[in-house]
Amino acid sequence: FNNELQRSEKMEIISELAASVAHEVRNPLQVTRGFLQLMTEQEDNKNKGYVRIALEELDRASGIITDFLTFAKPEFDHIVSLNIADEFDHIEGILVPMANLEGGKITTDIPPNLWIRGNSSKFKQAFINIIKNSIEALQGEGQIDIWAYAQDGIIKVHVRDNGEGMDEEALVRLGEPYFSNKIKGTGLGMMVTFRIVEAMHGQISFTSTKGVGTEAVVSFAAFVE
Ligand code: ADP
Ligand code: MG
């Protein structure tokens, strides 16, 4: 018992440290981004191609830090009532253009009366990570369906894609830190999503068939006033 306590205290210290380092690193990244952005706006810039890559890589570094921050400090200071349809309006705004770039479509069917308690930005991040993976898995006529409903006091959200799917090994390893099959993957996305869902006392499960597609089901306790 004593050992457990010491371990959790140590974890707490490591979490705090990780969160503050991540915060500190973010500032110089933002400043660098600002100057690079200015360089792309110069008419005579012969190095535009390089600057664009530098910007992309900088954004990738920021993304990794955001994921890591969530992992280090997943508890939420700001818990409110979340309307699922409203949250997905925002999520769609971010991801529909990305899906279109990949030649895919996103369809949502979410009734307006579904509420849970939670942190809005963490909720969005959890689903953005799931749907981004779906987009990245798309091939040919890509389709992603998202739908939600209430069942016995539980809100369930499904995300289904007709992408490349996963084999048994990938399914088992999903959520393991640094597990990725992508050239530029971080392998942090699902770890963060699992952690957020856990902190919100929800549940998440995946089914997948190689070559056919993947379906995620995420559930939370419904909130009734
Ligand atoms: P990353 O996206 O950086 O690789 P993730 O933790 O988000 O890390 O995902 C881990 C791996 O799980 C991915 O590299 C991919 O192989 C697999 N994966 C996750 N979601 C899907 C999906 N919807 N379809 C196919 N493979 C998936
Ligand atoms: Mg991912």
Image (spheres, grey):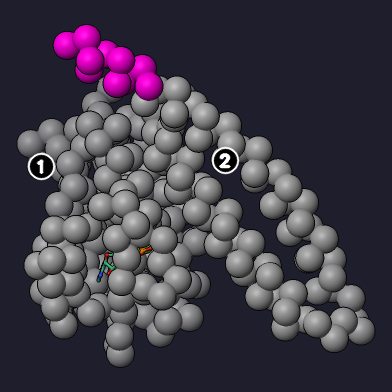
- Specify whether residue 6 is painted magenta: yes
Along the viewing direction, whichever of 84 and 143 lies nearer the viewer: 143
- Kind of element beneath mark 1: strand
**Mark 2 vs mark 1: in front:** 2
The image shows residue 81, relative to residue 9, as above or below, that is: below
The image shows residue 73, relative to residue 210, as above or below, that is: above
Would residue 203 be found to the left or right of residue 58 on screen?
Answer: left
The amino acid type of the residue labelled 1 equals Gln
Residue 181 lies, in percent from the top left, at 31, 71
Residue at 17% over, 71% down: 166
Q: Earlier in the sequence, mark 2 or mark 1?
A: 2
Residue position marked by numbered label 1 in the rendering? 151
Visible residue check, residue 194: yes
Residue position marked by numbered label 2 in the rendering? 22
Ligand 2 resides in the quarter of the picture at bottom left
Would residue 90 be found to the left or right of residue 24 on screen?
Answer: left
Bounds of the magenta segment: 1-10
Quadrant where the C terminus lies? Answer: top left
